[in-house]
Amino acid sequence: MKGHWVEFDRHWRDTDVVNCQVCGRLIPSRAWMFDGGRGELRSCSPDCEEIYFSYVEPEHGPKEAAK
Ligand SMILES: [Zn+2]
């Protein structure tokens, strides 16, 4: 694991719906950020980093970074 947790500030949470870039689940209060090969991706947990590197990235190629 090379990612890290990022707590959302209230402003961001109130104005945007934030979804995991790996599994699509809603991220309620903090995101697990990791480098997906083309920049930082926003996910809901370290498990999604594992899923990304064991399935998503080898099958579909690296995802674009979070905006
Ligand atoms: Zn996820």
Image: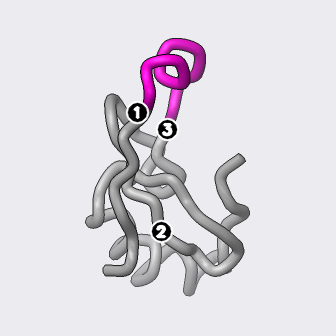
Q: Which residue is mark 3?
A: 19
Instruction: Tell me the CA gap for discs 3 and 2.
Output: 15 Å
Instruction: Give the image location of residue 29, x and y in percent.
Output: 32, 32
Query: Is residue 12 shown in magenta?
Result: yes
Question: Is residue 1 found left or right of 18 in the rendered image?
Answer: left
32 versus 35 height, above or below: above
Give the image quarter of residue 27: top left
20 versus 53 height, above or below: above
| Amino acid residing under circle 1 | Leu
Looking at the rendered structure, the secondary structure element under dot 2 is strand
Q: Which residue is mark 1?
A: 26
Q: Which residue is mark 2?
A: 34
Looking at the rendered structure, the secondary structure element under dot 3 is loop
Mark before the other along the chain sequence, 3 or 1: 3
Q: Quick check: marks 3 and 1 in contact, CB under 8 Å?
A: yes
Q: Main secondary structure of the magenta part?
A: helix
Instruction: Give the image location of residue 47, x and y in percent.
Output: 27, 65
Q: Which residue is found at the position 64% from the left and 75% from the top?
A: 60
| Amino acid residing under circle 2 | Phe
Instruction: Give the image location of residue 36, x and y in percent.
Output: 57, 74
